[in-house]
Image: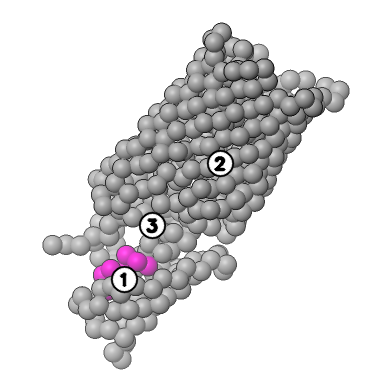
């Protein structure tokens, strides 16, 4: 039976498709020593010598190796396994992929697309606005922010994430006298993933897809206190393997006695995902605690937010900071910063609000040759 490189343990919809999946493997043998090389295009990524029979036998070997991706001198991934030579190829590829994912977005065993910002304004502010009541774009960080007595709102968003990862997103907010409902659907897609059965040319390509459908509700329960919750249906497909799951968000915001200061707390993505072939993926849960201070200076409305975000699955903490200024309720400039990621930190964006239409743009630069992310959002108020 022909053995192909199974990707059941990997999540290609996150990032680094081009960095890993457009690589090739070559093997050589000289003076009783075999050498396995991994290439990215025409550039060798690393090579591993080992004393073993020629490629083809399934003798068990035990190797230590260090993966050194190009333009990523700080990245080291060390793996120690007892495996056959065919399995060694998979192990090397998996290690290189996980090395890139962990530095670009934080490692996760599954559903990592849920870590990505859902719209341009949130991305430009580094998801720092956990305490932003009445603002639709911040309701995906904290569902309590959904509560409003304002108008109906529709949002369309497109994300061109790094390494050709794309996300499409549509959401609506429906306020009523007793509370506010929200609904959203999103799709994340990575195309052109190369498939190989042996080291050498690709025998074809496949796609990795993920999607979610969610419903939310938020309301003012007592004076100055809003609470909200979200229920999500999750779906993933990698090659021919599929998995479904669920997730929950809960949150609250409180307007403090200090004018302009709002505190907020939220826990997002509580839930699980079914088995993807033989691997169970965990949903990346985050707990956020933060505050936003808003003030007016002449024709400028300003907001500054600070949030401490804890990745419950990875035991990693991130500080998220954001500042927004809006001139004459029309033109917005935004800047943000997030700690804890080796390849990204600073974010920025702009926005225009004219009549019933809002347009937002965010720019998220990455280091180590991973590229840049661009997010576009278009909103309508009725």
Residue that badge 3 annotates = 21
Residue extending farthest to the top is: 177
Q: Residues within 10 Å of mark 2 (few under 14, many from 20)?
A: many
Residue that badge 1 annotates = 88
Q: Earlier in the sequence, mark 3 or mark 1?
A: 3
Q: Which residues are magenta?
A: 85-92
Q: Secondary structure at mark 2?
A: strand
In the displayed structure, 59 sits above or below 193; it is below
Magenta-drawn stretch, dominant element (helix, strand or loop): helix
Residue extending farthest to the right is: 298
Q: Earlier in the sequence, mark 2 or mark 3?
A: 3
**Residue toward you, 253 or 45:** 253
Q: Percent x, y for residue 145?
A: 60, 25
Q: Secondary structure at mark 3?
A: helix
Q: How is the image coloured?
A: one colour
Quadrant where the C terminus sits is top right
Snapshot quadrant of residue 218 = top right
The residues tagged by marks 2 and 3 sit, at their Cα atoms, a distance apart of 33 Å
Q: Percent x, y for residue 115?
A: 50, 43
Q: Do the numbered discs 3 and 1 sit on residues whose CB atoms are within 8 Å? A: no
Q: Nearer the viewer, mark 2 or mark 3?
A: 2
Q: Nearer the viewer, mark 3 or mark 1?
A: 1
Snapshot quadrant of residue 33 = bottom left
The residues tagged by marks 2 and 1 sit, at their Cα atoms, a distance apart of 37 Å
Q: Is residue 242 magenta?
A: no
Left or right: where does residue 18 sit relative to residue 380?
left
**Residue toward you, 59 or 359:** 59
Residue extending farthest to the bottom is: 31
The residues tagged by marks 3 and 1 sit, at their Cα atoms, a distance apart of 16 Å
Observer able to see residue 25: yes
Left or right: where does residue 62 sit relative to residue 270?
left
Residue that badge 2 annotates = 287
């Amino acid at each position: 039976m022909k053995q192909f490189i199974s990707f059941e343990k990997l999540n290609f919809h996150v990032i680094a498709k081009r960095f890993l999946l457009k690589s090739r493997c070559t093997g050589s043998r000289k003076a009783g020593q075999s050498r396995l090389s991994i290439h990215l295009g025409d550039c060798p990524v690393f090579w591993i010598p080992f004393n073993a029979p020629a490629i083809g036998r399934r003798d068990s070997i035990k190797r230590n190796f260090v993966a050194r991706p190009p333009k990523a001198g700080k990245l080291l991934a060390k793996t120690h396994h007892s495996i056959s030579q065919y399995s060694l190829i998979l192990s090397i590829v998996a290690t290189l992929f996980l090395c890139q994912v962990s530095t670009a977005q934080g490692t996760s065993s599954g559903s990592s697309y849920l870590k990505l910002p859902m719209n341009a304004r949130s991305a430009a502010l580094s998801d720092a606005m956990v305490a932003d009541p009445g603002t639709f774009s911040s309701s995906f960080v904290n569902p309590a922010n959904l509560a409003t007595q304002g108008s109906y709102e529709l949002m369309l968003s497109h994300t061109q994430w790094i390494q050709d990862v794309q996300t499409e997103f549509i959401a609506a907010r429906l306020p009523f006298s007793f509370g506010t409902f929200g609904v959203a659907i999103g799709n994340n897609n990575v195309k052109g993933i190369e498939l190989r059965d042996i080291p050498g040319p690709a025998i074809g390509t496949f796609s990795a897809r993920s999607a979610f459908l969610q419903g939310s509700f938020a309301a003012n329960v007592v004076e100055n206190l809003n609470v909200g919750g979200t229920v999500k249906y999750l779906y993933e497909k990698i090659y021919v393997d599929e998995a479904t799951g669920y997730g929950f968000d809960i949150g609250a915001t409180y307007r403090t006695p200090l004018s302009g200061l709002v505190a907020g707390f939220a826990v997002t993505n509580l839930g699980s995902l079914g088995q993807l072939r033989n691997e169970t993926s965990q949903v990346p849960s985050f707990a956020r605690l933060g505050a936003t201070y808003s003030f007016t200076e002449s024709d400028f409305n300003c907001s500054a937010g600070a949030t401490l975000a804890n990745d419950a699955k990875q035991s990693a903490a991130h500080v998220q900071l954001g500042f927004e200024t809006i001139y004459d309720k029309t033109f917005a400039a935004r800047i943000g910063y997030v700690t804890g990621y080796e390849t990204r930190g600073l974010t920025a964006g702009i926005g225009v609000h004219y009549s019933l239409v809002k347009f937002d743009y965010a720019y998220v630069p990455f280091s180590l040759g991973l590229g840049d992310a661009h997010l576009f959002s278009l909103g309508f108020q009725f």
